[in-house]
Amino acid sequence: MINKFINRKIMKVYTMFILGFIVIAYIVVSNITKELETYIGETLEEVSRQGATVVEYKLSMYEERVERFANFQTIKNKKTPIEDKLEALNRESIKKDFLDIGIIDSDGTGYTVDGKVFDINNIEYFKNIMEKNTTTSGIVDLSINPIDSVIHSSPIYSNGEIIGVVFASSEARQFEQDIFPSLFNGKGNIYILNKELEVIFTSNNRKIKNNNSEDKSENHIKELKYLENNLRNRKIGTLKVDTQDQEIYLGYAPVNNKSNWIMVSVVDASTVSYRANIIIFEILQVVIILFIVLLCIMKYIFNLRKKAEEERVYLAFIDEVTGKTNYSKFTIDAKNILQKRKTNNYAFVYFDIDHFEIINETFGETIGNSILRKVSDIIEEYVPKGAIYTRDYIDFFILLLPYNDNKNEILGLLDDICNKVKNITITGMEGVDIFLTMGIYYETDEELSIRSKINKADTARLYIKGIDTVRYKVFCEDMRLKQIEEIHMSKQIKEALKNNEFEVYYQPKIDVITEKIVGCEALIRWKNNFGEFIMPDKFIPIAEKNGFIHIIDRWVFLRVCSDIKIWNKSGFEINPISINVSRINLYRSDLIELIKEHIKDFEIDPSLIEIEITETIASKDLDLTIKKLNELKSLGLKISMDDFGVGQSSLSNLRMLPIDILKLDRGFIVDIENDSKSRKIIKTIIELAKSLELKVVAEGVENKAQRDYLEALGCDIIQGYYYAKPMDKGSFEKFAFDRNINI
Ligand code: C2E
Ligand code: CA
Ligand code: CA
């Protein structure tokens, strides 16, 4: 979705960029064309003006000389024979400056100084000179010289009467070379018009002798009619002429001398546009290259931004511990999945790792994180298509699983996950099994928020949290009530701790043979404000869930230590006292240190203290349990395994655990009179215990029959109502005193 958004943004910018480019290119091209037109016009005008100046200079040079010759006395004298005149002319002029130089006599016969004679009658040019009395130049073919020439002539006056003409011709090509620069690489034309606006020179075709010239420049001449007025008025200027067949640019300037010629420069618009196109093409090339470079830069920037955006999204949606998608992504996906649901039903599963905090403390965070990663890898491996999962926080995971009608599929899947997780192997933590506690909510109320559905699964999880034998529980509404009760109870426990409402009771353990006290068990009692007793079964499991168990067990330990100290001071002989330590506290890293500290503070002989740990610890985390128990033993304490027979731990485990005493669970004792099977089990356990040199305590013995059976089966010690109920310190002292001196 984000990619789509970014792509749309990029497309928008690109489109704007391309449109902008087209507009700019258009403006640039039209500006260049306009500029070029102006430049062409100015160039043509300048060319015409300069050409005109050169022509002016050239003509005036020749025309002044022929005028001077015409003013020679010898030549002006009517009576001087033509030979003498030619002689004088030859003398005065430098022949090599001219192609031909000569005189035209009044009868219309032409003579050159080198003896050529020709007839000029009917030559308009000379007629004009004679009649109009002007010095001028022109293009006239006198057929006396094969080289094309320009003729410069001046009338000869004698007493106010024209008696002939002095003429001199110069080489037309030379003339042209001097005046015709190359215009637009030869693509332009320059014309020289005489004052009758007839073309007398063109830069392409030197002389226009007749009108049937095939030269293309001919075409241009027609266009001169657009200029007629300007030319006749001898103006300087430039003009763009648009005709049906073509477009041309014209520049014009008059030649200010006696000949009154006019210079006109012409260039075809196609030449201009060709030039313009070349320039435009070159500019466009540069612009396109720049454009492509810019596009590349933009693309690069977009890519960087896109990457950054993707990274941001990635970081926002990735759980950095597991490397999988996080809770935020889970909720988005879950919403989508549930909205688009078809036939599927869905189950929310919420689970955590048992004693994760302890594992983290014992083995370190790196190993803790490896476990979280492995657990999430296992989920990934096992969950079916269409399922999603995430880590919620710390060691809490959520699954959203589709199922058809068969809820057993879900349970099967969860079993698989539990089994696989149990056997995770992590270097540095070998032999430690990992257990999960799972709550399941089969979605019934679609309207609930995702979090509420997760919370329901969590409620089911909490319901069985701490019951190590159950791995998962399905949510039902009644659990809510229990949860509320527990919350209420948690608050009360907190208050009770503050108000000192707890007390330690002692229940004696009696030697079955001597019937003397051989020890006792410390059991906590809670007497609330109303004087009611709240039994440990009610609040210990809750304290185990909310962590208060740590404070409770510590408080009991301190109280027992303090009582031992008092009894010690009073001179009582003391038997070992067993103190219950919740399996949750067993794994705490500070347990050993605390016990050590208390024993030291109260100056207690450690052999007077037995630690009772429930059997369930033997069914899991065996290596860790052995390690912890050995640490306790190293302090000089004795270890008693409580409730043996409940946790289904194998008898072989018993061999591996460093324990001193085995306490048979009350459940066996209840049936002992009626159930021969129970008796058989007890017998086996006692025999095994004996072989391991363990003392056996039977608890919950309520009557003589039970006591006698146990004696017969080889049990050493008996704890139960039959002998004594748990009692407060004072009562216990009295009981002990009555029975024997020892406590
Ligand atoms: P437990 O460790 O198995 O303690 C023995 C329980 O059996 C005691 O219940 C005791 O009163 C009861 N009992 C003893 N003899 C008989 C009998 O003949 N008949 C019957 N019906 N019951 C008998 P209590 O004191 O209610 O304690 C229940 C459980 O609470 C304990 O079971 C123990 O797991 C836990 N608990 C008690 N005090 C503490 C404590 O200070 N710390 C911890 N962590 N747990 C404790
Ligand atoms: Ca116990
Ligand atoms: Ca017990």
Image (spheres, rainbow, N blue to C red):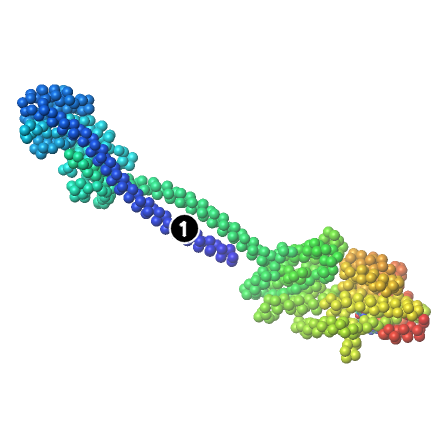
Give how far across and how far down residue 372 sits, in percent: 68, 57
Q: Which residue is mark 1?
A: 18
Give how far across and how far down residue 122 sits, in percent: 8, 30
Nearest to the observer: residue 677 or residue 318: 318
The quarter of the displayed image where residue 716 is located? bottom right
Q: Is residue 141 visible?
A: no
Question: Which residue occupies 19% across, 22% down?
Answer: 96
Question: Which residue occupies 74% across, 55% down?
Answer: 363
Residue 471 placement, left or right of 188: right
Residue 546 placement, left or right of 661: left
Quadrant containing the C terminus in the rendered view: bottom right
| Total numbered badges shown on the rendered structure | 1
Give how far across and how far down residue 207 sits, in percent: 18, 31
The quarter of the displayed image where residue 352 is located? bottom right
Q: Is residue 585 visible?
A: yes
Image height of 166 relative to 385, above or below: above
The quarter of the displayed image where residue 121 is located? top left
What amino acid is found at the position of numbered circle 1 in the picture? Ile
How many other residues sit within 10 Å of disc 1, few (<14), some (14-19) or many (≥20)? some
Secondary structure at numbered mark 1? helix
Give how far across and how far down residue 450 sits, in percent: 60, 66
Nearest to the observer: residue 185 or residue 518: 185
Question: Which residue occupies 24% across, 36% down?
Answer: 50
Question: Which residue occupies 89% across, 71% down?
Answer: 707
Nearest to the observer: residue 443 or residue 275: 275
